[in-house]
Amino acid sequence: MNKSIFVGIAILIVASGCATSRVDFRANDLKESDRVLVGRVMVTHRGDPFTKDCRVEIENGSTYQLDETGLLYLPTEGGTPKLKRILCQSTSWYHYEFTPAIPLRVGKDRSTAVYFGDVAVDWDFNGGLKLADLLGSLGRILFDSGNDGHLTFTVADNFKQTVGAFHSEYGRAANMHYAKSLLPANRSPASVAPAVPANQ
């Protein structure tokens, strides 16, 4: 199958399908093979807040709906998960695929959550109704395979605040431990962070 058509189909499925969010996280439901990622992704479009209209897609197929906090509590199933794509909905769905996908380091077991950083995404795209949408599903498959606009991101280390929010909501009850490996993963082991953030 032509790669652009395949990408178009994938985008259509992700945009129209279900996505989990931080309120869906259940520490008691973690499988033995699951690994937990914790971080924050904040998206702006030409300087305006846009986070709550965006989704993050991991290469294994899981999709995560952001809310206005940008907090991301994501269980992934084994292996090395990779940040594949960001999608945001204006009048149409807009997407940006990272090529290659960005690896995310995970903990040694399901009780160790790895903090990947606070990611600030600055995305510039034209907005409005896309031509592909005027042609329906087939149009999106055929004409909507390329990245939209220009995207840059920076990563800050706000471990205490972001992991503290996770710990107070879920981690304390689950007796979670924490490690830190900021994006992009630097091919080095995750550094060991305090087991419990201060003041939690």
Image (cartoon, rainbow, N blue to C red):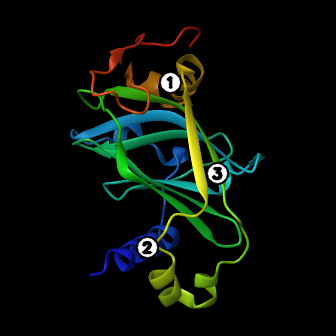
- The quarter of the image holding the N terminus is bottom left
- Which secondary structure, mark 3? strand
Above or below — where is 159 with respect to 142? above
Q: Residue at x 30, y 32 (%)?
A: 106
- Dot 2 or dot 3, earlier in sequence: 2
Q: Residues within 10 Å of mark 2 (few under 14, many from 20)?
A: few
- Dot 3 or dot 1, earlier in sequence: 3
- Which secondary structure, mark 2? helix
- Which secondary structure, mark 1? helix
Asked whether the beta carbons under mark 2 and mark 1 sit within 8 Å of each other, the answer is: no
| Residue identified by numbered label 2 | 13
Kindly identify the amino acid type of the residue bearing the numbered disc 2: Ile
Asked whether the beta carbons under mark 3 and mark 1 sit within 8 Å of each other, the answer is: no
> Separation of disc 2 and disc 1 at Cα?
33 Å
What count of labels does the image hold? Answer: 3
| Residue identified by numbered label 1 | 167
Q: Using the image as rendered, state which of residue 30 and residue 179 is in the foreground.
A: 179
Tell me residue 113's x, y (percent): 37, 28
| Residue identified by numbered label 3 | 123
Q: Is residue 146 left or right of residue 120?
A: left
Q: Residues within 10 Å of mark 1 (few under 14, many from 20)?
A: many
Q: Nearer the viewer, mark 3 or mark 1?
A: 3
Tell me residue 120's x, y (percent): 61, 37
Tell me residue 30's x, y (percent): 32, 41
Kindly identify the amino acid type of the residue bearing the numbered disc 3: Trp
Q: Is residue 109 left or right of residue 146?
A: left
